[in-house]
Amino acid sequence: GRRFFCVRQRKERVGGFASERQEPRPGRSPELPRSATECMAASSAASGAAAALPAVIEGERVQLVADCRYELGEGALWHDGLGRLLHVDITGCTVGLLDPSSGAVAQTPVPGPVGTVVPVRGSNSTVVVCLDSGVHALDLMTGALTRLASDPETDLPGNRFNDGKCDPHGRLWAGTVTKEDPRTPTAALYRFDAARLGDGPEAELPLRASRVLDGVTISNGIAWPSDGKSMLFIDTPTRRVDRFDWDEASGCISNRRAAFHFPEEDGFGWPDGCTLDSAGRLWTAHFAGGEVSCVDLELRRLVCRVKLPGSVRNATSVAFGGPGLGDLFITTAREGLGAAELAEQPTAGGIFRVRNVGATGVPAAACLLPSRAGACGADSGAEGARAE
């Protein structure tokens, strides 16, 4: 259908214009290392924490934990309260909860593509999801949806929500993606704050959207380092991780500059979802690259590469979870693969795990909803979660 066609272009067509935007704008940041391979060689002199990781993790260490065969698995996030891995199949229109001990996945269907899922502070039965119709609270037991915020891009029907996370204060951030032509940067990044009296029609809903970044093409990974002063962001076609100054009190961002660049010649594919470990290193999934990278952003050095097994190419998101947040989980996608490629990659669309990867994660921030969010009426129902 058209939805698949539009979403498929998201990844397949970015290659035609990567060279236009892959370098930082002049004057914005110091020159970055030319080659990630050179960075890997230089990392032998890195700190003890970085040296604890092998240069490459592959083979039997990277195991398939759930053969979901998702079209576009994304949004991996560990739910501490449930001890499960939250994730979505964007075009499969489902929210999933993976039990790593058994490999069982409980799925809750939603009415349309779902770009983001995050836990809600103080609740194990409710999550927040971003759909074409806006931001909603989703009851995992009943499938009921409660509208929290309207779609901020009703004037752009060719866009949809993509990756998102909550900042340390519990504010939801979510970006959009241009479905119809990724060469046109009409997407954006949004922050959702509690609505206030005087906000107009939006005040009738608990959250209101603030557009914090324009000119985005494929909004993807987002993370907040432990310094409490910065935010990391990936717009996939740039092949960069960008750093912003982030104001803790207001949530405002400024002073964009490049933090790391993934050169095309080093075979990374396209940077997608990301997460930070407790040492401040950034782990990034690479679509069409078949791997997850670990980068020391302070030293601007590549520390480790986790290679997916079975020729699986489309890594989409990454999260720490399990006991002590010491396991690494990776979602993947079948999107855009033809019959021959699927025959070569039969486990594409599955969820993979590296036990005791050698690093530990940090707890994912949950969404702090205004107290009046519970008074919103349910927009629509759906079947409850089902295990598969």
Image: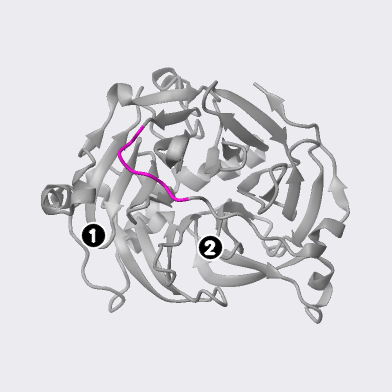
Do we see residue 64 in this rendering?
A: yes
Q: Considering only vertical position in the picture, is 210 above or below 356?
A: below
Instruction: Out of 258 and 47, give the one closest to the viewer.
Output: 47
Tag of residue 300:
1
Q: x, y percentage for residue 355?
A: 38, 30
Q: Is 297 on the left-hand or right-hand side of 371?
A: left
Q: Which residue is rendered at x = 18% and y = 54% of the image?
A: 47
Specify few, some or many for label 1: CA neighbours under 10 Å numbering under 14, 14-19, or 20 or more: some
Q: Residue furthest front?
A: 324
Q: Position of residue 177 (x, y in %)?
A: 56, 55
Alpha carbon distance from label 2 to label 1: 24 Å
Q: Residue at x 47, y 26 (%)?
A: 338
Which residue position is annotated with label 2? 168
Q: Relative to 301, say whether 333 is above or below.
A: above
Task: Report crowding for label 2: few under 14, some 14 to 19, many 20 or more residues within 10 A (C-alpha).
Answer: some
Chain part drawn in magenta: 356-362
